[in-house]
Image (spheres, rainbow, N blue to C red):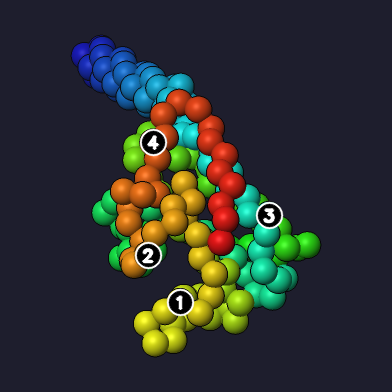
Amino acid sequence: MKTTTTSNLLKNVLNVLLLFALSITLATAQSDTDKKPEKGQSITVTIDKVKNNTGQVMFTLHTEDTWLKGQGVQNKSTKIENNKVSITFENVQPGTYSIMVLHDENENNRMDFENGMPMENYGMSNNPLSFGPPKFSEAKFDVTTTNLEFDINF
């Protein structure tokens, strides 16, 4: 009789532990599905007057930390059709950014220079007209709670 009682008690304890573990697992799974991924804003960039349809146009979304240091926080490229291009950066979190755009005519994925001067067209958000290296302060904009659209000129 003692063996049966001990055996039943052990089964009950194991069942309670199993139910407890199962309830924690289900609660965790439920809370994970309740969490929505952070959805940022969209930034659509359009260029209407590309010099020609040769090559590609490269777009980089930068923070001040990535400006002129290589890849941005998001990077895209697209072919040119009818001297026009348009892309959208998705899920951009609130912050201060700038956009740099390059018409990469020879598709070597970089800006080409001759005697220190760019050989390919480029542009930036806010379309600043400045001489010398591009400045983040001239191209910066804030992403808050609304989607943005930019028309950039080369």
Count numbered badges in the picture. Answer: 4
- Does 11 sit left or right of 124 as displayed? left
The C terminus: image quadrant:
bottom right
Q: Quadrant of residue 22?
A: top left
For the residue labelled by badge 2, is the local secondary structure a helix, a strand or a loop?
loop
Quadrant containing the N terminus in the rendered view: top left
Mark 3 / mark 4, whichever is N-terminal: 3
Q: Nearer the viewer, mark 4 or mark 2?
A: 2
Please name the residue that numbered disc 4 is placed on.
Answer: 142
Foreground: 2 or 66? 66
Residue depicted at 53% across the width and 36% down the height: 148
Residue receiving disc 2? 131
Residue 15 appears anywhere in the view? no
What secondary structure is found at the residue carrying circle 1? strand
Question: Which residue is disc 1 drawn over?
Answer: 118
Marks 1 and 3, the one that precedes in the sequence: 3
Residue lying at 51% horizontally and 79% vertically, measured from the top left? 119
